[in-house]
Image (cartoon, coloured by chain):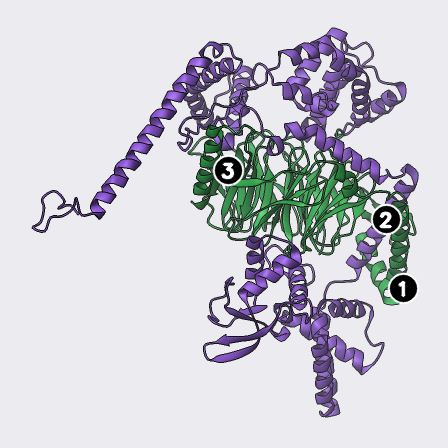
Chain colours: A green, B purple
């Protein structure tokens, strides 16, 4: 891991060698010092040779962790499922696939909804990025990226552009043009530059800024027009796999999860890591905020999904079952936050009741692992992309209360036509 | 290397394998596991085998799941080789009957077939450790411990190999021994996992984060867990009527009934649910464009509209293009912050001083403090008054509750799915209009010309669509439909009875025909009949 995407804020004389160089701000015994990168390397090697600096640092970290746990435990007065006992249980859930989008030649790695609630952008292993109108299942645009394994794609809030990236270490923005003769690839704008693969990208509230996370262990905020790096975020010790922006009033924080089993909350203005959670037993594949912005859920390779609260600063619930062995690759909340949809590597999608901690439904249907699950912006349906190269848009069937003969007949027929769609 | 990209690594099931092996071990438990017996395979008797049905039954009981799920999980065990079938060894599927299966030896489990280099490195470190205690240096000790944890069940194998190799090397001549030792050491020095400076930086960063978090925790304090949990419950209850997956939506979910009224109905008159949502929080009101407009109208009446305009201008600065920041900030200053400006906003003196100071070097976040101040001012003062005002209450009274989509008589016939104009088109139209207005002598290139042509072709389609939606909206608001309701029901009753009659008669004819054929009343005559030659 070598992260070169640090923002050199200061340039001046190094405290050690007194040469004018870009300075790195590091802390020694809680004192900030300004060393140039060469001196930092030298100091690190010397410290290691003695073998004591790392140990002292580690023991300090351990004591701080213990103190934090103590503080958190003082306020642990109730469990989530205890409070949730008073709420009525959810009824039976019948989920059916209503649209199957076929057209990718290889594994679908990532997908995103447009704000108009019916368009989807998806990216796959063969380098193709396709924009679909999921309602009519028509393909509207297709772009071929010069690299394979396009692991991240995002739709712009205005609906006029898509961003995608992967093994090329870059994030490129393509403005969507309706002229059939125009080659979309010609208008491509290279925005982000990392030193390792791009794992996830997301537009902030406008088309002008993109937040990216990468396999080099950093996240970064970029300006789309100029391609300039606005802020970089360091703190993960392994690949960062996923990030999500907070739906809060001030709109200034985001959460990221990585292969070092940590989920970190960052402040976008200062680049500081304000909170960190490390209770997972394996890599965190996906992080998503609860709709109110006070909590977030994570899906991990240890086959559990967990809910963390930001104000209590601790893990609040674990969603796991003995029969679930494979890791969760992607999670998303329903509009009200009552349901958590999680896609797993054993080809299924499990739907969890967030408050009670139980599973309400399990969906089969994909023929390879589910790589991403997203609920539509209006909450009517959810789309799942999988390594079997299809995307499925599924809904919940509810039987209306009246026991009218016509209603029953209608619902039954819809169920059967649902099955017919699903087999295509 | 330890940090390899997991997404495209061929098999990265580490955690899943551990869990699967744990489950397989519990399956083989003599008391609580699956009952093994001698199974007959043709003429031979195989000991310690079980049937497919046994496996599924055990899984159902142990994990309390449905049989579909138990079959799915059992299938995974067979696929990855932990259980193998005896009858058809090449066909790796689980059958829920009395076909026999057996457990695989741990030596052949997937996790033991580790990438060779890790195992070799483990053997090398073990050799070093056995040869002389304390010879391992710092990072080697860490790697040794990490490997010991990771490949624990082959550790005996590793130690045995290390001892064997040491014993074999003792039989060599001293010179050869030294050469080999140096070669090996050089190889592992080059191929060792990354460490030193990066590790130091990481550990420092982690320690700093923890220090910051602890300081924040001690200063600001944490919220009690029951408060947080109750807030989730409250949020879910409040938003449940708005969640289509939980409670459905009116008129209907477009994906099920192929009716897109739900997406197109909020043009002129909003729905009651939408207006109610504005009362949940100030952010909901501002996020909805119609809500924002209504709020602006209210603020104009109260002569405090400049607050919302200022907030919007600050959002524009924060999320807009970097190159335009200085001029935008200048605009904001001229319009809102200069004393005596036409739309002067009321900020406290301290914030104003700080903002004015920052304006000398404008950057993206220079107006943040002022924006925050105005936002909270509106939230605490104007927003609650708006919710109690007549303007809001009248809007809520006028808001409609859409009618449920009428279900057609033949529900299996799919309605036509119309496409909608792409959002890219809408902004291109605005862009082109803007371009045409601003530049008179600017020559448009072929790209914009073809776009304009496209727009012109699509415009009548658009207008027609809007007209259709308007009509549908009128229907929804019951302006036309009330008087026709009764006759509609009658017509539908007639339609249903005709359909039933047709269906029944077709079935009867078919039954009569087949019974006649069966009793040889109708059919090919012995001499060959012209009537049924087609058969």
* A208 left or right, relative to A10: left
Q: Is residue B261 above or below residue A172?
A: above
Q: Is residue B491 above or below residue A230?
A: above
Residue at 77% in and 41% down: A266
* B410 left or right, relative to B68: left
Of B476 and A206, which appears nearest the observer? B476
Query: Badge 3 sits on which subunit?
Result: A
Q: How far across and down, in percent of the image, does residue B346 sit?
A: 83, 15
Gap between marks 1 and 3 measured at Cα? 55 Å
Q: Which mark is residue A167?
A: none
Q: How far across and down, in percent of the image, does residue A286 sit?
A: 67, 47
Query: Badge 2 sits on which subunit?
Result: B
Q: Which mark is residue A131?
A: 3
SS under mark 1? loop
Of A336 and B491, which appears nearest the observer? B491
Per the image, the residue denoted by label 1 is A52
SS under mark 2? helix
* A140 left or right, relative to A334: left
Q: How far across and down, in percent of the image, does residue B83 sit?
A: 57, 68
Per the image, the residue denoted by label 2 is B210
Q: Is residue A138 visible?
A: no
Indicate which label's residue lies in the foreground, 1 or 3. 3
Q: How far across and down, in percent of the image, does residue B253 sit?
A: 53, 29
> Tag 1: Cα neighbours inside 10 Å, few (<14), some, or many (≥20)?
few
Gap between marks 3 and 2 measured at Cα? 43 Å
Q: Do tags 3 and 2 sit on the same chain?
A: no
Residue at 68% in and 23% down: B277
SS under mark 3? strand
Dots 1, 3 in contact, CB < 8 A? no
Residue B178 placement: quadrant = bottom right
Residue at 35% in and 28% down: B499
């Amino acid at each position: 891991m070598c992260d070169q995407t640090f923002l050199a804020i200061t340039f001046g004389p190094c405290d050690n060698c007194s040469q004018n160089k870009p300075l790195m701000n590091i802390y020694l015994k809680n004192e900030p010092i300004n060393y140039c990168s060469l001196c930092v390397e030298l100091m690190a090697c010397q410290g290691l040779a003695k073998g004591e600096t790392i140990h002292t640092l580690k023991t300090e970290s351990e004591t701080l962790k213990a103190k934090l746990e103590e503080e958190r435990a003082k306020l642990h007065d109730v469990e989530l499922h205890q409070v949730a006992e008073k709420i009525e249980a959810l009824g039976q859930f019948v989920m059916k696939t209503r649209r199957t989008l076929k057209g990718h030649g290889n594994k679908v790695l990532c997908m995103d909804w447009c704000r108009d609630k019916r368009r989807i952008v998806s990216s796959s292993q063969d380098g193709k990025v396709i924009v679909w109108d999921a309602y009519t299942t028509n393909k509207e645009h297709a772009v071929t990226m010069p690299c394979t394994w396009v692991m991240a794609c995002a739709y712009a809030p205005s609906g006029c552009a898509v961003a995608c990236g992967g093994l090329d270490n870059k994030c490129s923005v393509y403005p969507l043009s309706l002229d059939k003769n125009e080659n979309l690839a010609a208008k491509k704008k290279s925005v982000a530059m990392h030193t390792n693969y791009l794992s996830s990208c997301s537009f902030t509230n406008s088309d002008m800024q993109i937040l990216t996370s990468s396999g080099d262990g950093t996240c970064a905020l970029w300006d789309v027009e100029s391609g300039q790096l606005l802020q970089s975020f360091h703190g993960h010790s392994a690949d960062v796999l996923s990030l999500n922006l907070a739906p809060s009033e001030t709109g200034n924080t985001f959460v990221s999860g990585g292969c070092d089993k940590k989920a970190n909350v960052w402040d976008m203005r200062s680049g500081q890591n304000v909170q960190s959670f490390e209770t997972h037993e394996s890599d965190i594949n996906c992080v998503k905020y609860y709709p109110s912005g006070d909590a977030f859920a994570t899906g991990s390779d240890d086959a559990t999904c967990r809910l963390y609260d930001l104000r209590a600063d601790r893990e609040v619930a674990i969603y796991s079952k003995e029969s679930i062995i494979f890791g969760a690759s992607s999670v998303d909340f329903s509009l009200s936050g009552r349901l958590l949809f999680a896609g797993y590597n054993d080809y299924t999608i499990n739907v969890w009741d967030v408050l009670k901690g139980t599973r309400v439904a399990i969906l089969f249907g994909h023929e390879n692992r589910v790589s991403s699950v997203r609920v539509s912006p209006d909450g009517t349906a959810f789309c799942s992309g999988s390594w079997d190269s299809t995307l499925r848009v599924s809904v919940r069937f509810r039987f209306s209360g009246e026991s009218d003969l016509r209603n029953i007949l209608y619902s039954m027929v819809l169920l059967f036509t649902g099955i017919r769609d699903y087999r295509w | 290397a330890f940090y390899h990209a997991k997404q495209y690594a061929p098999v990265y099931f580490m955690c899943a394998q551990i869990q699967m092996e744990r489950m397989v071990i519990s399956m083989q438990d003599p008391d609580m596991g699956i009952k093994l017996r001698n199974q007959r395979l043709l003429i031979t008797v195989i000991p310690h085998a079980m049937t497919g049905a046994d496996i599924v039954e055990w899984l159902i009981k142990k994990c309390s799941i449905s049989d579909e799920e138990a079959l799915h999980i059992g299938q995974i065990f067979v696929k990855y080789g932990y259980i193998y079938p005896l009858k058809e060894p090449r066909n790796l599927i689980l059958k829920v009957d009395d076909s026999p299966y057996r457990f695989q030896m741990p030596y052949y489990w997937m996790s033991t077939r580790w990438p060779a280099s890790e195992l070799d490195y483990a053997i090398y470190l073990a050799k070093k450790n056995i040869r002389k205690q304390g010879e391992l240096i710092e990072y080697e000790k860490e790697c040794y411990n990490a490997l010991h944890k990771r490949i624990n069940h082959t550790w005996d194998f590793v130690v045995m190999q290390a001892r064997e190799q040491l014993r074999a090397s003792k039989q060599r001549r001293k010179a050869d021994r030294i050469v080999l030792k140096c070669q090996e050491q050089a190889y592992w020095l080059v191929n060792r996992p990354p460490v030193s400076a990066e590790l130091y930086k990481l550990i420092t960063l982690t320690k700093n984060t923890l220090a910051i978090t602890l300081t924040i925790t001690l200063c600001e304090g944490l919220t009690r867990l029951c408060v947080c949990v109750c807030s989730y419950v409250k949020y879910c209850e409040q938003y449940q009527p708005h969640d289509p997956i939980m409670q459905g939506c009116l008129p209907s979910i477009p994906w099920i009934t192929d009716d897109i009224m739900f997406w197109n109905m909020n043009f002129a008159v909003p729905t009651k649910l939408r207006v109610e949502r504005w009362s949940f929080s100030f952010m909901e009101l501002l996020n909805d464009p119609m809500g924002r407009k209504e709020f602006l109208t209210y603020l104009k009446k109260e002569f405090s509209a400049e607050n919302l305009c200022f907030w919007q201008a600050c959002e524009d600065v924060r999320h807009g293009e970097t190159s335009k920041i200085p001029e935008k900030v200048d605009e904001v200053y001229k319009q809102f912050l200069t004393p005596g400006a036409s739309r002067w906003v009321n900020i406290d003196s301290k914030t104003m001083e700080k903002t004015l100071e920052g304006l000398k070097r404008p950057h993206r976040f220079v107006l943040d403090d002022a924006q925050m101040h105005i936002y909270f001012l509106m939230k605490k003062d104007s927003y609650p008054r708006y919710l109690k005002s007549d303007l809001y209450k009248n809007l809520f009274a006028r808001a409609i509750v859409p009618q449920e989509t009428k279900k057609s008589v033949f529900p299996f016939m799919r309605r036509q799915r119309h496409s909608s104009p792409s959002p890219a088109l809408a902004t291109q139209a605005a862009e082109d209009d803007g371009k045409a207005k601003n530049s008179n002598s600017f020559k448009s290139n072929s790209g914009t010309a073809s776009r304009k042509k496209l727009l012109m072709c699509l415009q009548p389609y658009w207008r027609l669509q809007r007209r259709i939606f308007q009509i549908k909206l009128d229907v929804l608001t019951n302006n036309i439909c009330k008087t026709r309701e009764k006759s509609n029901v009658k017509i539908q009753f007639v339609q249903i009875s005709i359909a039933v009659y047709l269906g029944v008669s077709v079935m009867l004819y078919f039954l009569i025909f087949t019974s006649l054929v069966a009793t040889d009343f109708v059919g090919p005559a012995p001499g060959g009949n012209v009537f049924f030659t087609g058969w």
